[in-house]
Image: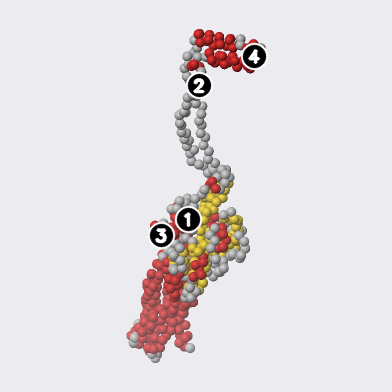
Amino acid sequence: MFYFRYLSAELIRRFGKTLTISLGLAIASAIIIAIISVSQSLSASQDKVLNPLQNVGTDIMVTRSVSTENLSTLDTTTRQEAMSENRIQTDLSKLGNPGDSFVSDTFATGTQLSFDSTVTANIDSSLVKNYATGLMLTVQHQEGKIPSVTATFKTGGETYNVQQDIAPMTDAEQQAVDNATRAAESSADCAADQHSDACRQATRAARDAAMPDRFKGKMNFQFTAPEKSYTQDVGPISTDIKTTSYTVAGVDTSKTDIGLILPNQVVDGKYFDGGANEIIVSKSYADKNGTKVGDKFTINKQELTITGIVDPKLYTNTADFYMPLSDLQKLAGKDGRINILLVKSANAKNVDATSKSLSSLFTGASITSAQDTAKQVSGSLVSAANLTNKFIGIVSVIIVLAAFVIVSLLTILSVNKRIREIGTLKAIGWSNGLIIRQIIMENIVLGLFGAVIGIGLGIGAIAILNHFNISLQATIASASSSLGGGFMRRFGGNSASTQSSGTTTAVQLHVAFSYAILGIGAGVAFLGSIFAGTLAAVKASGMKPQEALRNLE
């Protein structure tokens, strides 16, 4: 008991040194706890983004991807399919009469061409544990009034004069006509009644016979009017047609643990429950457009009810809206067609073998694994995680060494000030072993104090970091981002691009600690105290009593 009373008395008597050494060990312990916790939390957040396939219960994604760059290398059938599935042309003449209001939705697959869903029958069940199908489409939505285009052409109003010069009758010719007329009027046909038809006919015949020959011919001529072309520029057509684009995905609702979205990713409302006309909106779209649960949304003239808001985790293939696969196939006229196949390998070690098997499911099958998706991610989250992973070892070693050196110097300094005390202990019979044990025991207690305080400081530092709600950005090159404009315009469409070159997601950094991390931090403080105590104890044990007693404290 004497040793413990002496130990406690020394620690209390030298409270300043006790507090200084304990705090030094505690700070080193807290820094180690904070650094390791932040590093592991960054790695955990990074893993969720770098491996989005894992977030939806899968290892492999199978698609049928093409691009404008390799279009010329495609076979004729595939090229024609790409053109057919992405040609967006609006024929206003088929939507109604001029002045009528119209709404038109056109669906396109973009770079992910569709394929027959029956290919799933050829999946090797010995390699695949589970799978889910999906269909992701870009919708070009147009609405407005069909414009009325008119042009007025004015022609006519020209005056054509036709003239022919005929010499008038001479006096003799006129006298001959008059004589013939009078002779006819005196004839038997006119004797009874000069107003009879017979008299008029006889008179006309006699007069015509007496007419000169130049008055007897018929005038025959052909007149051709000059040709004229009329052109009128009607100018640009003014319309009120509005065009917007968004993406919609069909979800395999028969699976709840694998798919484009999962029930546990719904942040508001509910997941699909088999009701009619259900649709779920992504959180990013809802936040941007003020959409909420219960709102109505119309696709291809079918009114749907928004039943939930989802925060999708398959970052490389996100959509604005999600609906049951069969419903989307019917709306888009793509019965039996899919363009995404998510596969869970039966054995994590056989992912490569599974990928090889899946690549032969159909011509042009494209296989995406976790390694492929990791290459598509950039942003502050990745930069911070990479930086932390690169320097955490170096920083930790520097901190530990600095703590050991500082605490050792403080401990040795403390022992140097106890020279007379140590000499007295040796003079009354304490052996070197007892001296070493006493000093090491004091430092063990200091190490325990430092460990406890360090754990408290580490947890406090973590709480402060979480209080600031640190948010890091991760930009993922999204396959759905290429479903729009450029690719479809290649085939004569006039669509607008729906997204940029990638999907940017904000990842909230939640720093968490574990008992193992706390144990490492406490171990640093404890080992540092033992290391420092051992150095000081060895130095103290080498003192001779007579030399120690000659020194004053």
Point out which mark residue 74 bears.
Answer: 3
Mark 1 to mark 2 CA distance (whole Å): 69 Å
- Residue at the location (54% across, 41% down)? 148
The one nearer the camera, 478 or 46, is: 478
**Which of the two marks, 3 or 2, is nearer to us in this view?**
2
**Looking at the picture, does residue 354 appear above or below residue 240?**
below
Asked if disc 2 and disc 4 are in contact, CB closer than 8 Å, the reply is no
Q: Percent from the top left, x then y, of residue 381?
A: 44, 64
Asked if disc 3 and disc 2 are in contact, CB closer than 8 Å, the reply is no
Q: Earlier in the sequence, mark 3 or mark 1?
A: 3
Q: Which residue is mark 2?
A: 218
**Looking at the picture, does residue 523 appear above or below residue 277?**
below
Q: Percent from the top left, x then y, of residue 198?
A: 63, 16
Residue placed furthest toward the bottom? 429
Mark 3 to mark 1 CA distance (whole Å): 14 Å
Task: Write down the quadrant of residue 474 in the picture.
Answer: bottom left
The amino acid beneath tag 2 is Lys
The amino acid beneath tag 3 is Leu
Q: Percent from the top left, x then y, of residue 48?
A: 47, 68
- SS label for mark 2: loop
Q: Which residue is mark 4?
A: 195
**Which of the two marks, 1 or 2, is nearer to us in this view?**
2
Is residue 283 visible in the rendered image? The answer is no
- SS label for mark 1: helix
Mark 2 to mark 4 CA distance (whole Å): 29 Å
Q: Which residue is mark 1?
A: 84
In the picture provided, is 517 more to the left or to the right than 148? left
**Callout 4: few (<14), some (14-19), or many (20+) C-alpha neighbours within 10 Å?**
few
